[in-house]
């Protein structure tokens, strides 16, 4: 066998070398057994293809069959360590299935996510994995998922019928509250928005622990969005808050910017707990240097990032290969890391 790197070998070349028509060569190379072709002819075509180093054009074949052996993956930003780790196992499973991957980065924008959804569908990908941090266009997802499988990882929109693989966020919030309750802390500030189902579940789990355990001696303050971040300094200095829980690393970084700008005293008396290892979501070098200055220990709820990516990809390929079972809602265990 030899490979011609100057001009690609075409179906016509194989047919000519085998001494048969293009249409009959195509039937053999596409492994069509519903039309009778002699074994001698099949052997001649296969031998000619091997001798010439023929490789079928996946794009041309995909246009005919929509089997492009390609999936799409949409992330908020590939440079963030969290999403870098998430995509590694997606990539491994994709390669194991002999597929390729198209990657789109939404930059945390709803219109960016919509753009890549449409682009990937137009390019005939066979399925899409989305790690969404925005209020996804559910109507668009519904339209696309009727034609190709869609799987959400890390987060998902409300009322979606698509499969999803996420951490057990209720359990994570519950663990964080349980950890803080053991620290003899009386004044706790819960900081985090509730604009996504996973964030709502973290808040429900956090409150669920205190409700179940009748922790009346704990006082809980809540800051719900970015516009209220300036209240943190007030709570620390005026309300004697001695513990901060952040429902996401994004909220943790945004809040610490406010705190360090106000020169708040973050001595080791302040307990900080977050969701995710905080360095996973740093967006620039300034955030990194700011976080390194924080003297308070930061404990956090660790998500099984690799497992989220692996299971999301495996479910997608199950759907591509014909799995028509009910919606898959996968919740994976979290782990408390104490510092």
Image (cartoon, grey):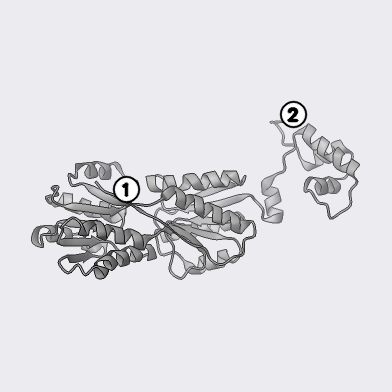
Identify which residue is drawn at 19% across, 52% down: 271
Could you say where residue 41 lies in the image, as x and y percent from the top left?
Answer: 89, 42
Which label sits on residue 2? 2
Q: Residues within 10 Å of mark 1 (few under 14, many from 20)?
A: some
Viewer-nearest of discs 1 and 2: 1
Q: Is residue 30 above or below residue 187?
A: above
Could you say where residue 66 lies in the image, as x and y percent from the top left?
Answer: 67, 55
| Number of numbered tags placed on the structure image | 2
Q: Residue furthest top?
A: 2
Q: Which residue is mark 1?
A: 277
Q: Is residue 88 visible?
A: yes
233 and 295: which is toward the camera: 295
Side of 334 relative to 153 (left or right): left
Identify which residue is drawn at 39% across, 48% down: 82
Identify which residue is drawn at 22% across, 64% down: 223
Side of 309 relative to 250 (left or right): right
Provide the secondary structure element on which disc 2 rests: loop
The answer to the question of whether label 1 and label 2 lie on touching residues, with beta carbons closer than 8 A, is: no
Identify which residue is drawn at 89% across, 52% down: 36
- Whole-angstrom CA distance, mark 1 to mark 2, is 51 Å
Q: Is residue 80 visible?
A: no
Q: Earlier in the sequence, mark 1 or mark 2?
A: 2
2 and 173: which is toward the camera: 173
Could you say where residue 59 lies in the image, as x and y percent from the top left?
Answer: 66, 48
165 and 44: which is toward the camera: 165
Side of 331 relative to 335 (left or right): right
Could you say where residue 335 lies in the image, as x and y percent from the top left?
Answer: 34, 52
């Amino acid at each position: 066998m030899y490979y011609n790197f100057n001009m690609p070998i075409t179906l016509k070349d194989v047919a000519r070398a085998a001494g048969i028509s293009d249409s009959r060569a195509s039937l053999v190379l596409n492994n069509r057994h519903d039309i009778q072709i002699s074994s001698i002819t099949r052997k001649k075509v296969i031998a000619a293809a091997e001798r010439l180093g023929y490789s079928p054009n996946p794009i041309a074949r995909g246009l005919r069959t929509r089997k492009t052996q390609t999936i799409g993956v949409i992330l908020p930003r590939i440079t963030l360590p969290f999403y870098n780790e998430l995509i590694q196992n997606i990539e491994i499973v994709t390669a194991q299935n002999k597929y390729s991957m198209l990657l789109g980065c939404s930059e945390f924008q709803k219109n960016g996510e919509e753009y890549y959804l449409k682009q990937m569908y137009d390019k005939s990908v066979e399925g899409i994995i989305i790690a969404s941090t925005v209020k996804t266009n559910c109507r668009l997802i519904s339209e696309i998922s009727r034609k190709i499988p869609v799987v959400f990882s890390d987060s998902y929109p409300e009322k979606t019928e698509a499969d999803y693989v996420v951490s057990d966020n209720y359990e994570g919030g519950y663990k964080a509250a349980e950890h803080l309750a053991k620290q003899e802390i009386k004044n706790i500030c819960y900081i985090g928005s509730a604009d996504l189902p996973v964030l709502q579940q973290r808040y429900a789990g956090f409150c669920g622990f205190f409700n179940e355990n009748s922790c009346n001696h704990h006082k809980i303050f809540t800051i719900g969005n970015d516009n209220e971040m300036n209240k943190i300094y007030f709570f620390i200095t005026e309300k004697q808050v001695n513990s901060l829980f952040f429902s996401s690393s994004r909220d943790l970084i945004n809040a610490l910017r406010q705190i360090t700008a106000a020169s708040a005293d973050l001595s080791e008396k302040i307990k900080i707990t977050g969701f995710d290892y905080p360095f996973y979501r740093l967006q620039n070098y300034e955030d990194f240097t700011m976080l390194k200055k924080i003297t308070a220990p930061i404990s956090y709820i660790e998500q099984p990032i690799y497992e989220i990516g692996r299971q999301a990809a495996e479910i997608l390929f199950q759907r591509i290969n014909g799995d028509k079972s009910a919606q898959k809602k996968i919740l994976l265990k979290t782990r408390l890391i104490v510092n």
